[in-house]
Image (tube, rainbow, N blue to C red):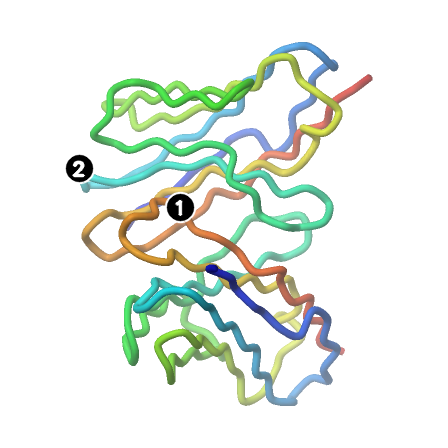
Amino acid sequence: SQTIHQWPATLVQPVGSPLSLECTVEGTSNPNLYWYRQAAGRGLQLLFYSVGIGQISSEVPQNLSASRPQDRQFILSSKKLLLSDSGFYLCAWIPDPQYTEAFFGQGTRLTVV
Amino acid sequence: AQTVTQSQPEMSVQEAETVTLSCTYDTSESDYYLFWYKQPPSRQMILVIRQEAYKQQNATENRFSVNFQKAAKSFSLKISDSQLGDAAMYFCAYRSRGGSEKLVFGKGTKLTVNP
């Protein structure tokens, strides 16, 4: 079966600390992977997306970065968190070309204090 | 760059009535997909309906239907016989096909259903 795992569900981090959010998928090869951020009551802002290992497209220049070390693993990172990095982070994937829509993880609520 | 605009931050409808949510998009591509997603308070993203740009026929899924106007770059969602469970944030989304594979969303419309 095809599933997506995103963790942790909730995270509270101090300003200036590093960040690592992980998203892994199962059940297919070479999926499209996406990271979004959603501020409170706002829309989904596309941060990064990847169509293959080592292929990362960045949409928003900021202190976040993404990596895809394995085919089914997508990691969102920061070396030093800012207060403005607080929000709800969603990972999404499109399993293979026969799918038109994306499927989403459960999300991570990040609070930077 | 592809952009999606939802001009209605909030909408409300009476239970059993019909409501239409608006969405426009900007693209220079000819082949793409459009979607409406629902996000209830649980924040889980749920696909409501999809439309392939090369198909002229408007998509329908039970009480949900779209009005796809490709030339006008408009993609509205109509919810008929609204139910209390329809209350949620609704996002319009655009996916490039065969190109960048970018998937972008609008800012959302918060739908309230009044009993």
Q: Which mark is residue A83?
A: none
Task: Return the x and y of residue B1 as percentages of the image width and height.
Answer: 28, 50
The answer to whether residue A70 is above or below residue A102 is below
Query: Badge 2: how crowded within 10 Å, few (<14), some, or many (20+)?
Result: few
B57 with respect to B60 (left or right): left
Residue B100 against residue A80 in the figure, above or below: above
Label 2 element class: loop
Q: Which residue is mark 2?
A: B30
Q: Which residue is mark 1?
A: A101
Mark 2–mark 1 Cα distance, whole angstroms, equals: 18 Å
Q: Residue at x 52, y 21 (%)?
A: B64
Mark 2 or 1: the one toward you: 1
Above or below, B10 relative to A29: above
The C terminus of chain A, quarter of image: bottom right
Q: Residue at x 52, y 18 (%)?
A: B78
* Residue drawn at point x = 62 percent, y = 60 percent: A106
- The outermost residue toward the top is B17
**Residue A47, image quadrant:** bottom left
Q: Amino acid at mark 2?
A: Ser
The chain that hosts pointer 2 is B
Residue B34: x, y in percent? 36, 36
Instruction: Determine the chain carrying the residue at label 1.
Output: A
Left or right relative to B30: residue A83:
right
Expressed as whole percent of the image width and height from the top left, the position of residue B30 reads 17, 37
In-image side of B26 versus B4 (left or right)? left
Q: Amino acid at mark 1?
A: Glu
Label 1 element class: loop
Residue depicted at x 63% and y 38%: B89
* Circles 2 and 1: CB atoms closer than 8 Å: no
Front residue of this view, candidates A100 and B4: A100
